[in-house]
Image (spheres, grey):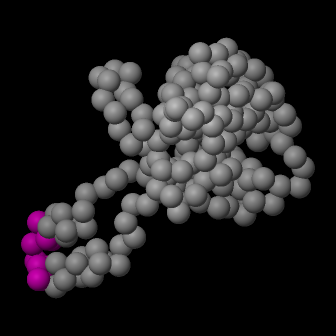
Amino acid sequence: MKYYQEIVIRQVEEIDPHFIMSKVMTEIHKLLAKQLHTHGKVFCGLSYPEYSNKNKRDLGKLIRIFAPEEDLLSEMNLSSALKDLSDYAAVLPIKEVPEHIVTYAMYKRYHKGNSIGNQAKRYVKRHPDSDSQKVMQMFALAEKNHKKEDYPYVIMKSSSNSHTYSYFVIKEIQNKPKDGTFSTYGMSLGGTVPEF
């Protein structure tokens, strides 16, 4: 990744910044879906430099969109796409990624899965010769030690059916850059983004 562009969510008293983040992410999703349609892949990945899983909803107020080529960011034309949100979100100019990056990250979607208890029941059904009581005890112990979902998220709204859903984001630190593509939400499908 050689280029990036930042979007800064402005603090406005009467509007929750999470609401603005939701609107911005919806527009970015549309732009990345267009990139997928045009190029067959999504080359642009997102990072959240203020990401914190201490506050469940806090992705921060800064989004960075990375691309291997400047043209990919120019083609997205974020300023135009977010013009209706210009009072609430500032789109900064495209810049080169600084040299000597030592940390990279993969931002991925966290899929809220079934409870561990349900997983145990399915395991017993698939393995009828297993000791169901021991399996249930093993899964109960795992559930007790399981870290609850405390990942930051953004509320998204489906354009196809207007349902809202929580889009949870996990950040995984990497020591080396990895080439790869991204989802239409800018989440890693194998590629990393620089951390700075």
Q: Which of the 4 image quarters holds residue 171?
A: bottom right
What residue appears at the point 70 percent right and 28 percent down from the top-left corner? 90
Q: Is residue 73 above or below residue 155?
A: above
Left-right relation of 31 to 99: left
Q: Can you say whether 122 is above or below 181 in the image?
A: below
**Residue 185 is inside the magenta segment:** no
Nearest the viewer among 71 and 126 is: 71
Q: Is residue 42 visible?
A: no
Instruction: Say if 53 sits above or below 86 in the image.
Output: below
Near-viewer residue (135 or 59): 59
Looking at the image, which residue sits at the far right? 99
Residue 41 horizontal side relative to residue 152, left or right: right
In the image, 176: left or right of 26? right
Q: Is residue 127 magenta?
A: yes
List x then y, in percent, for residue 158. 37, 27
Residue 163 appearing in the image: yes
Q: Is 50 left or right of 94, judged from the image as shown?
A: left
Q: How many marks?
A: 0
- Going 25% across and 57% down the picture, which residue do you hit? 114
The x and y percentages for residue 85 are 60, 21
Picture coordinates of residue 95, whole percent (x, y)? 84, 34
Which residue in the rendered view is the most extreme toward the front?
A: 13
The residue nearer to you, when weighing 35 against 148, is: 148
Q: Compare residues 172 and 90 and report the one nearer the observer.
A: 90
Above or below — where is 60 with respect to 133?
A: above
Q: Give the image quarter of residue 164.
A: top left
Say which quadrant the N terminus sits in. top right
Q: Which residues are magenta?
A: 123-133
Residue at the image position 56 percent from the left and 29 percent from the top: 24
